[in-house]
Amino acid sequence: MEIEEHPLYGVEVRFIDSFAPAIMGYVVTFICSLLTLLSVVREKVGGTFERLWVSPLRREEFILGYVIAFGMVALVQSGPILGLGKLVFDIVINGSVFWALVCIILFAVGNVGLDTLLSALAQTESQAILLFPLVVLPSVLLSGMMWPLQAIPRVLRPLSYLVPLTYGNKLLRAVMVKGVAPWQEPVGLARVLGFLTVTLAGLTLRASARE
């Protein structure tokens, strides 16, 4: 009897190969948080919102515009990072680059929605900067980006499952390292889609409440 092995992933995979998807997810979180918090608060302070609300523009259209714009910014930022990782560090990408970018866009849209909701707590740009670490630091320390979730202290581990980047990392690593389609990682995909849906629903309800 002869046994033929056909490994799908995990063969000669270096640390950088599994770290690159997490870095892409972190870049999306960092950029979306910084741009969204500062831009929304700046427009609030500058009176842009008051002028928009008296125009024929609907609030849902305004929110959609923000989501699309910052989602594209995150995509533009992640594309060069992916290319740099491949050309310079020669990271292994076993999966589809297209599906990886789709996952990044979904995660970026969810982050834009979350940060837009958080911007309601800030009245000035200084207050928005104070909110920024509340999003970024948990993403670094508790998402499994730097170390496995099993290495996080048991007291803090439940908080890891509340950090969106935890599931963004899980989904991106499945697509890029394992080479599977997004729907073949149902837990990560469901949580990312749930994160996106909840944040957009919260934005819609908040916009409706202002009418």
Image: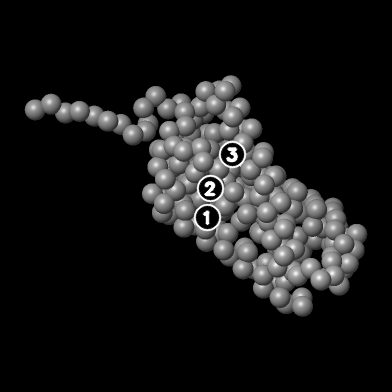
Pointer 2 or 3: first along the chain = 3
> Can residue 93 be seen at all in this image of the molecule?
yes
First in sequence: mark 2 or mark 1? Answer: 2
Q: Where does the image place residue 145, in percent across and percent down from the top left?
A: 54, 40
**55 or 14, which lies in front?**
55
Image position of 163 (left or right of 186): right
For the residues bearing labels 2 and 1, Cβ distance under 8 angstroms: yes
Numbered disc 1: secondary structure: helix
Q: Is residue 7 above or below residue 110?
A: above
Tell me which label, 3 or 1, sits earlier in the chain: 3
- Disc sitting over residue 128 in the figure: none
- Residue at numbered disc 3: 24
For label 2, the residue is 103
Looking at the rendering, which quadrant does residue 195 occupy? bottom right
Q: What residue appears at the point 85 percent right and 70 percent down from the top-left corner?
A: 55
Q: What element does badge 2 sit on? A: helix
**At which x and y percent is residue 126?**
84, 53
Q: Nearer the viewer, residue 190 or 58?
A: 58
Q: Amino acid at mark 3?
A: Met
Which x, y percent locates residue 199? 62, 63
Q: Which amino acid lies under the numbered mark 1 shown in the image of this protein? A: Val
List the residue tagged with mark 1: 192
Which residue of the protein is positioned furthest toward the right in this rendering? 46
Q: Residues within 10 Å of mark 3 (few under 14, many from 20)?
A: many
Q: In the displayed structure, would residue 5 be above or below residue 22?
A: above
